[in-house]
Image: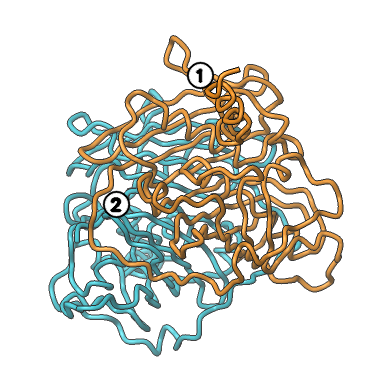
Chain colours: A orange, B cyan
């Protein structure tokens, strides 16, 4: 066996040389008619359907891998209409409008037996250097390395195991059964369980990794489902390569819970203190 | 002349009995083929196109007046693709998916000479009583009546005159030419110039009445355009009738401005202290 082939063998054992589970799960293939196909993943499964971050990222991927794509995501809105059933699904991805520097896209996810299960819209842009300022302040938190990895008491849904959570505050106290509402605020270091450099796809998915604010406020798990979520991207591809980070500090909170629907606002920070993305969502709950 | 007809005459002079300019401007008519038509309004004009809040509200109105509509808006996302030209425009409004309690809609706004100028998605739901909580705190501000009406130094775009602004803090200091960035935060009482009871349509429009955060930070007006905006509704029709308010306390801020794009987060509060809606947007700027 030559030294070269030994080197290759060693290299093949390096995690970075094998496809990442997130990329395998969110892989999309273009059909001859211009539509796309993909499939749900057991590894990113939630309660009655895929983890919403999987759905958002897979829809975004059809745009990013589209031959007409120009620029990086500025915003992504995903409306989850119905649970995606286990198995293959179709994606209709359309460049609605292109201007000199921006692209407006829409995506529709459907299955024969389900119908339309999700729709998304996205804006992409080629971003250039300009005056800049970050009014938001990086929260005061211990470093990623100094924060212990969170262990769940009960086996969580499979998607949870695809991530690593290091709660600074607002860890899921699902068994506390609080009488008065507890704070909806959380600070948590989080990233892919197998480290993967952050990109727009993983930021879209990480926008949905905060656990339901309602669980935290009530101290128990109740029927819950995100109906609309948005991610605003404050860093482009080049910025993210420069950051070279595999985890974010996530800051989440909720502002109003009324008549079965509540919101979530979130920030995704790089360890260097840069605000990479902000996210909002509205979710159904039964309580 | 009978007493009855005199009463009718008096009644006809009451502001509340004549159509409100906002309702006239955002009026939509359904075509025989199921599409809708509407027209831009000189009264709600901005720099190179209509005020974005006009566009969002007009698109939402096609959903609310649609014969298949059920429930009230939970969320509305409007992506502004290109300036709408003065004159009539078409709206393609589609019920993408309906479940037991929710409806998912999409709207496309187009003009023959412009193409697609805006797209929107919305989620509607019939909301029922449930456990509720409002973690967000009403800002400490003087009452609406105690806050003076703001007078603009320069004649503003026409849409601005359709509203009344009473700044508590963060008034547009467009001529301060600040060297260092000023705060992006604003607290402002605002409502239709001719009072109109708040509904989902006006909340959608009021989501865009905050002036560009970038103007405030720089102390001057620069080229600017919203590309994507979202409103989350925390009150349904019945709640809004109960509030019976014609003005909101708006709280806006910005978190990141980089490479020509910056964000805005906003809250719209009723005078009674209820969070009626929250809003986010991403906007282009040149600076």
Q: Residue at x 56, y 50 (%)?
A: A207
Residue A249 placement (x, y as % from top left) = 56, 61
Q: Which residue is mark 2?
A: B25
Mark 2 vs mark 1: same chain? no
Quarter of the image containing the N terminus of chain A? Answer: top right
Q: Position of residue A121 (x, y in %)?
A: 44, 38
Query: For residue A29, which numbered disc appears in the image?
Result: 1
Residue occupying image coordinates x 51% and y 77% = B271
Q: CA distance from mark 2 to mark 1?
A: 45 Å
Q: Residue furthest front?
A: A2
Position of the C terminus of chain A by quadrant: bottom right
Q: Is residue B56 visible?
A: no
Q: Return the chain for callout 1.
A: A
Of residue A176 and residue A152, the one placed in the foreground of this image is A152
Query: Horizontally, is A125 left or right of A184 in the view?
Result: left
Question: Where residue A286 appears, x then y in whole percent?
Answer: 76, 52
Which structural element holds mark 1?
strand
Q: What is the number of the mark on residue B131? A: none
Regarding mark 2 in the picture, which secondary structure is present there? helix
Q: Position of residue A108 (x, y in %)?
A: 50, 28
Nearest to the eye among marks 2 and 1: give it.
1
Q: Where B233 falls versus B107 (above or below)?
A: below
For the residue pair B227 and A163, the one nearer the viewer reads as A163
Residue B148 visible here: yes
Q: Chain of mark 2?
A: B
Query: Can you name the residue that lies furthest to the left here?
Result: B154
Disc 1 residue crowd, few under 14, some 14–19, many 20+, Cα 10 Å: some
């Amino acid at each position: 066996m030559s030294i070269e082939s030994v080197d290759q063998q060693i290299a093949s054992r390096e995690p970075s040389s094998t496809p990442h589970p997130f990329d395998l799960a969110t892989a999309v293939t273009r059909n001859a008619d211009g539509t796309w196909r993909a499939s749900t993943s057991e590894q990113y499964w939630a309660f009655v359907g895929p983890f919403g971050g999987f759905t958002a990222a897979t829809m975004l991927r059809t745009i990013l891998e589209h031959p007409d794509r120009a620029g990086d995501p500025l915003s992504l809105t995903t409306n989850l209409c119905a649970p995606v059933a286990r198995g293959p699904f179709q994606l209709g991805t359309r460049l609605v409008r292109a201007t000199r520097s921006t692209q407006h896209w829409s995506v529709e996810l459907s299955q024969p037996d389900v119908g339309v299960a999700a729709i998304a819209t996205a804006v992409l842009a080629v971003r250039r250097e300009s005056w800049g300022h970050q009014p938001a302040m990086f929260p005061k938190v211990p470093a990623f390395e100094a924060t212990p990895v969170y262990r769940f008491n009960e086996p969580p849904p499979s998607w949870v195991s695809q991530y690593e959570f290091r709660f600074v505050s607002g860890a899921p106290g699902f068994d506390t059964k609080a009488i008065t509402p507890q704070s909806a605020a959380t600070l948590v270091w989080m990233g892919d369980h197998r480290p993967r450099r952050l990109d727009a796809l993983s930021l879209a998915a990480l926008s949905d990794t905060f656990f339901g604010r309602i669980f935290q406020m009530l101290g128990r798990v109740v029927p819950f489902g995100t109906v609309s979520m948005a991610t605003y991207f404050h860093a482009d591809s080049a910025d993210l390569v420069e950051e070279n980070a595999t985890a974010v500090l996530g800051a989440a909170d909720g502002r109003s819970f009324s008549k079965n629907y509540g919101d979530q606002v979130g920030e995704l920070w790089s360890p260097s203190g840069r605000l990479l993305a902000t996210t909002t969502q509205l979710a159904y709950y039964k309580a």
